[in-house]
Image: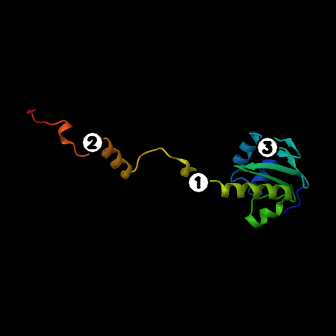
Amino acid sequence: MNTLETMRLDKWLWCARFYKTRSLATEEIGKGRVTVNGQLAKPARDLRCGDTVALRQGPVARTVLVMGLSGARGPAPVAQQLYQETPDSIATREKAAELRRLAPEPAATLHEGRPTKRDRREIDKVSNKGGDWGSRWSASIDE
């Protein structure tokens, strides 16, 4: 960690490995998914140690306290030293993860859809299409 006093918000989010690219960080800030000290921010906003950043990564909302600034993106263990997640944020994130884990499988609720081969055979059996060759179209002329 360098002894920087301020740093751009988008660059810090990228260095702290919240987003894969700086342009992704800029995009998320532009959509209003990142706030600094409770206020909407712009990508070029200066960030200082001690600021509180609330961000959203897909379905996961996090609130972190800025502990350090780094001039370059480093490995994950170094990036994790740049921030400290608040206890409320950790509890909320774990609760959401538990709810997702306990949620029913979405495909299990589907009762209709494309029939399986077995279903198709049963449908054919019921509608009597299976063995009744007389009702099918034929190339023969005799009726």
Front in this rendered view, residue 94 or 28: 94
Which label sits on residue 105? 1
Q: CA–CA distance between discs 2 and 1?
A: 35 Å
Q: Is residue 125 left or right of residue 28?
A: left
Front in this rendered view, residue 65 or 76: 65
Q: CA–CA distance between discs 1 and 3?
A: 38 Å
In which quadrant of the rendered image does the C terminus lie? top left
Which amino acid is tagged 1? Glu
State which mark lies toward you, 1 or 3. Answer: 1
Q: Kindly tell me whether residue 7 is visible in this rendering.
A: no
The residue drawn where x is 30% and y is 46% is 125
Asked where in the image residue 66 lies, by quadrant, the reply is bottom right
Label 3 crowding class (10 Å Cα cut-off): few <14, some 14-19, many 20+? many
Disc 3 target residue? 43
Label 1 crowding class (10 Å Cα cut-off): few <14, some 14-19, many 20+? few
- Identify the secondary structure beneath mark 1: loop
Q: Is residue 60 left or right of residue 36?
A: left
Q: Kindly tell me whether residue 112 is visible in this rendering.
A: yes
